[in-house]
Amino acid sequence: MNLEDKRLYLIEYLKNENRIYDDLEIPEDEEEKKALLRAMLNVRIATEASDDFLKIQDEYLTETIEEKGITDALSLKEMLPQIYLWQGDITTLKVDVIVNAANSGMTGCYMPNHACIDNCIHTFSGVQLRLDCAKIMEKQGHEEPTGKAKITSAYNLPSKYIIHTVGPIIKGEPSLEEERLLASSYLSSLELAASSGVESIAFPCISTGVFHFPNERAAEIAIETVMRFLKENESHMKVYFNVFTNEDYEIYRQKLEVLK
């Protein structure tokens, strides 16, 4: 099976799994097929899949991520001792653990082809991740509180684990409590990573974007919290600040340069 054959197999499986797709016509165009498969994966509920599906899905996702290009965190240059800055797609970063900016439901973004990090991570890790998260939430019995974190396998991503944390959603200027909750998201993730024995962790810009936390203040809180944790715990963990936009890259670069 080549990549196109695997894509078609996965679409057909998902189509046969749900009657809502009875009248669905599979497009001929390759990019449209990619978008269709991603959308179908995004809206699929947390449920078991056949061994054959998982095998083909895992092969497909592994090949797709390799095509995008994997960056080994060990190849990156320190900005400060144990602290790195990298601009790129976090689903292609080879590091012990990546952090997902999750929502309180913790089972991923269900919006078809949405560009948020939660959607990207669930898409490229595989359907196993949503099922794992659903089981964690069922056992917990309530939504994940803001500022807390959970850890799962990363499945098909280059990282080993994913830490899922819920940052605050704000309107206007953040309150002191909302700033505390954002710091708690970073601190909870660091503590969970340390207790899990990982040696490197990559953070996205938690709570910015659709959660509306001001980018500059969010960066200050992220850097302050990480540096305090490393110092107070005498930790040797390597921390990677992952940014996607040029704006966030410049914010972090300037703030880290000042600390040199």
Image: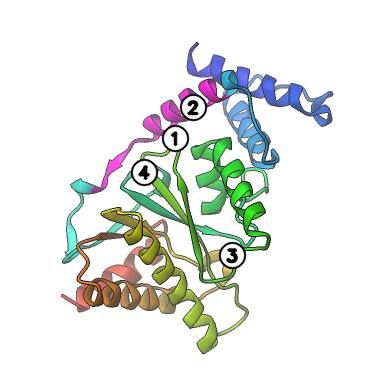
Q: Which residue does the image show at 50% across and 38% down from the upper left?
A: 124
Mark sitting earlier along the chain (2/1): 2
The vertical placement of 73 against 58, above or below, is below
Which secondary structure, mark 1?
Answer: loop
| Label 4 vs 2, first from the N-terminus | 2
- Label 4: state its secondary structure: loop
Do callouts 2 and 1 mark residues in contact (Cβ within 8 Å)? Answer: yes
Hey, which quadrant is residue 252 in on the image?
bottom left
Residue 210 numbered tag: 3
Magenta residues (range): 54-73
* Separation of marks 4 and 2 at Cα, in angstroms: 14 Å
In this rendering, position of residue 246 left or right of residue 26: left
Amino acid type of the residue tagged 3 in the rendering: Val
Above or below, comparing residue 16 to residue 129 in the picture:
above
The structure residue drawn at horizontal position 60% and vertical position 83%, both measured from the top left corner, is 172
Mark 3 vs 4, N-terminal side: 4
CA distance for labels 1 and 4: 8 Å
Q: Callout 2 environment at 10 Å: few (<14), some (14 to 19), or many (20+)?
A: many
Q: Position of residue 135 (x, y in %)?
A: 62, 47
Q: Which residue is mark 2?
A: 58
- How packed mark 4 is, by other alpha carbons closer than 10 Å (few <14, some 14-19, many 20 or more), is many
**Secondary element at tag 3:** helix
Image coordinates of residue 80 in percent, x first then y, are 18, 67
> Does the stretch in magenta take in 234?
no
Residue type of the residue flagged with mark 1: Asn
Q: Is residue 64 magenta?
A: yes
**Percent of width and height locating residue 177:** 53, 86
Outermost residue toward the front in this view: 139
Q: Which residue is mark 1?
A: 156
Horizontally, residue 111 falls left or right of residue 206, namely: right
Asked if one can make out residue 174 in the rendered structure from this viewpoint, the answer is: no
